[in-house]
Amino acid sequence: MKFASITGWGSGMPPAVLTNDDLSTFLDTSDEWITSRTGMKERRISHVSAIEMATVATAQALACAGLDAADLELIIYGGCSNEEAVPNSASGVQYALGARRAAAMDVNTACTSFLYGLATASGMIRTGVVKNAVVIGVELISRYMDWSNRNVAVLFGDGAAAVVVQAGGRDDGVIASVLGCDAEARASLRVRGVGCGYAGRGITFGDTLWDFDGQVIFKRAVKGMSEASLRVLAQAGVTAEDVDLVVPHQANLRIIEAVAKHAGIPMDKVMLTVQKYGNMSSATVPVSLVEALNEGRVKPGSLILMPGFGAGLTYSALLVRWGDRVQPLAVSPRTLPPCEETALAMVQRVRASQDPHGRSQAGLLGATLVDRQAGLTDDRDS
């Protein structure tokens, strides 16, 4: 039987830092308010495209694995930040790398996109469809954030990381996986204004309204991630005590703490990056994994639990047995270009391009149409 080992890892993190104090210059908030509710102190804002972040992360992961881009067979681009709907973003990474043999596909399950992508790539390798793949988690949320909405504007950041998965004979890589969706609550987390349902409604990409029901999301996220974690441990025939490290989706410190408690895993086994990167959606798990490797928290043979949830509401938990190598074989010279602006200046440019009144009116018109098409309302509601 073929196994799918993780042999390479790398990130493409933008350098510009947006602090809680920066946010308080245009939102009714403070460092204490944000930190006490989310555990977040700062997040990154990208000066380059999502594809460029993803390309740098992939180049680093390939160098780490000692794999040439020309030999890459599959690129999975996980995230909900796309330059265009057509063509897909994975093809942009393929072109930038010169990975001409690689198939290219996007996976969008919101914050769980990397985890769904890693499960998919591992399955394709085990069944012999491909011999190797790169799985990317990347987000450029700052470009379509509703910066007037304090409930969401303080939460999200930009970033990217990737892993290389290769066929091998050792029983490591993803050894168990649970994927699911709590679609009953899908309307609790939604970005209005992006998609075919809004066509002809006077809404352009970047003019968005965010639905974010914090209480519903918190309860469903804890339930989904906790139950998926327990199921994946049972599937692999191991217990919480066997887990060496938890690398969770970094949506909120309180959610992470609740999931760890339900799973019976102490917080000293949990990798935290939420304080310095915020919620990077699909990028949080791979970025945290790369940081854990850089900090020496991943050892040869480590058993790693990766739970997550996202809009949909999708949820997942993967159990990974790490291989022998925890050091990169090489480092790619490919890096992001220097950033000449502060994070706050970049955010202010996005804010200046947004018309809160026009966006709200158009968004509500488009939202009514989408609700009707989805069966969430009827004509009598309007």
Image (cartoon, rainbow, N blue to C red):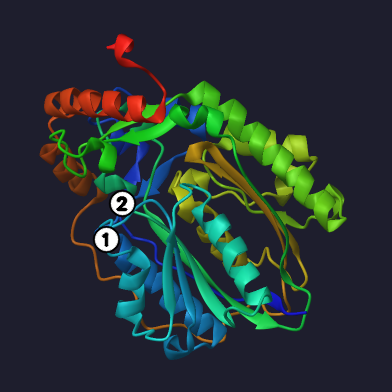
The answer to which quarter of the image holds residue 290 is bottom right
**Closer to the camera in the image, 103 or 268:** 103
Q: Could you tell me how far apart the alpha carbons at marks 2 and 1 are, in whole angstroms?
A: 25 Å
The dot on residue 86 is 1
Q: Which residue is mark 2?
A: 45
| Residue at image point 34% right, 72% down | 91
Q: Which quadrant of the view contains residue 48? A: bottom left
Identified by mark 1, the residue type is: Val
7, above or below 31, in the image: below
Could you classify mark 2 by the number of other residues whose Cα lies within 10 Å: few (under 14), some (14-19), or many (20 or more)?
many
Q: Is residue 145 visible?
A: no
Q: Position of residue 76 (x, y in %)?
A: 47, 67
Please name whichever residue, 89 or 294, is drawn nearer the observer in this view of the structure. 89
The quarter of the displayed image where residue 193 is located: top left
Q: Nearer the viewer, residue 227 or 330?
A: 227
Element on which disc 2 rests:
loop
Amino acid on which the number 2 mark rests in the picture: Ile
Above or below — where is 200 with respect to 322?
Answer: above
Q: Is residue 365 left or right of residue 332?
A: left
| Number of marks present in the image shown | 2
Binning the other alpha carbons within 10 Å of mark 1 as few (below 14), some (14 to 19) or many (20 upward) gives few
Looking at the rendering, in which quadrant would you find the N terminus? bottom right
